[in-house]
Image (cartoon, rainbow, N blue to C red):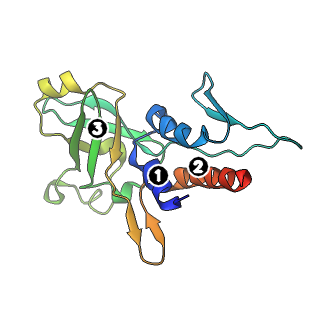
C-alpha cells in the first residue's frame, strides 16, 4: 500500500463539516476491501470486520475545516463564517473554492489597510468580517451560490523532503489513513 497515494486521495476532496458525502465515498472505497461498510443516519461511515476475540473500535474524523456562506452582498461578494476552526491569521488573500451549484474559485478579501481604522490594522481578520470575491454580479452569485454552501481554502498536496507531506485536512484525514493502514496490517 502506498500511504502517500492514500493520503493524497483522502485530501483531494472538500468534505467540510456537515458535507462529507464525497469524502466518505473515497474512504469507503478503501474500507470495503476489509469488511462490510455502511453509513448510519448521522452520516458516520462504519466498517465492520468479522474476527475472533474482543471487539474494538478504531475511530477518526473525515471532515475538514472550512467556511459556510452566510450572506451575498449587493456587490456579489460572499460573507462567510467558520465551519470548524480556521486560523484567521492565515485567511486574508487565500484562494478558495466555493462548493455551490458549480465549483467557483474565489479569493478572500478585506478592507484595504489604508481604509482601516487604527484599532483594526494589527488584528487578524475575523472570518465573519471577511468577504470572498468570486468575480460575479450579485444576481449571478445568487443564482449559483446558496446560503449554507461550503467553502474550502485551496491547498495542494505537497511532497516534502524526507518522505514527509503537507496539505489541508491532515489533522483528520491522516487519522483515517492510519486506520486504513492498520486494517491492511491486520489483514496480512
Residue occupied by mark 2: 176
Mark 1 or mark 3, which has the lower sequence index? 3
Label 1 to label 3, Cα distance in Å?
Answer: 16 Å
Q: Nearer the viewer, mark 2 or mark 1?
A: 2
Q: Quadrant where the C terminus lies? A: bottom right
Query: Residue 85, image x and y in percent?
Result: 47, 48
* Residue at the limit of the structure toward the bottom, as seen here: 162
Who's the residue at 56% across and 58% down the image?
A: 1
- In this view of the protein, can residue 124 be seen by the observer? no
Mark 1 element type: loop
Who's the residue at 57% across and 28% down the image?
A: 43
Tag of residue 9: none
Horizontal arrangement in the rendering, residue 180 relative to residue 3 (left or right): right
Mark 2 element type: helix
Above or below, 164 relative to 58: below
Q: Neighbour class for label 2 at 10 Å: few (<14), some, many (≥20)? A: many
Query: Residue 123, image x and y in percent?
Result: 34, 59
Label 2 to label 1, Cα distance in Å?
Answer: 11 Å
Above or below, 165 relative to 125: below
Q: Nearer the viewer, residue 9 or 184?
A: 184
Q: Which of 107 and 156 is in front in this view?
A: 156
Residue occupied by mark 1: 169
- In this view of the protein, can residue 55 be seen by the observer? yes
Mark 3 element type: strand
Q: Nearer the viewer, mark 2 or mark 3?
A: 2
Residue occupied by mark 3: 98
Query: Residue 16, image x and y in percent?
Result: 44, 39
Amino acid at each position: 500500500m502506498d500511504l502517500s497515494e492514500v493520503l493524497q486521495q483522502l485530501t483531494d476532496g472538500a468534505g467540510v463539516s456537515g458535507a462529507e458525502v464525497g469524502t466518505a465515498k473515497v474512504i469507503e472505497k478503501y474500507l470495503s476491501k476489509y469488511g462490510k461498510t455502511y453509513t448510519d443516519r448521522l452520516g458516520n461511515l462504519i466498517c465492520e470486520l468479522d474476527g475472533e476475540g474482543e471487539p474494538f473500535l478504531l475511530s477518526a474524523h473525515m471532515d475538514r475545516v472550512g467556511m459556510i456562506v452566510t450572506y451575498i452582498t449587493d456587490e456579489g461578494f460572499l460573507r462567510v463564517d467558520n465551519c470548524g476552526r480556521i486560523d484567521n491569521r492565515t485567511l486574508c488573500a487565500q484562494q478558495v473554492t466555493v462548493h455551490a451549484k458549480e465549483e467557483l474559485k474565489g479569493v478572500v478579501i478585506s478592507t484595504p489597510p489604508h481604509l482601516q481604522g487604527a484599532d483594526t490594522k494589527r488584528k487578524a481578520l475575523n472570518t465573519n468580517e471577511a468577504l470572498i470575491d468570486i468575480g460575479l454580479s450579485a444576481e449571478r452569485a445568487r443564482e449559483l451560490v446558496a446560503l449554507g454552501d461550503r467553502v474550502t481554502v485551496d491547498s495542494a498536496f505537497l511532497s516534502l523532503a524526507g518522505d514527509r507531506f503537507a496539505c489541508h485536512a491532515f489533522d483528520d484525514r491522516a487519522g483515517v489513513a492510519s486506520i486504513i493502514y492498520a486494517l491492511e496490517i491486520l489483514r496480512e
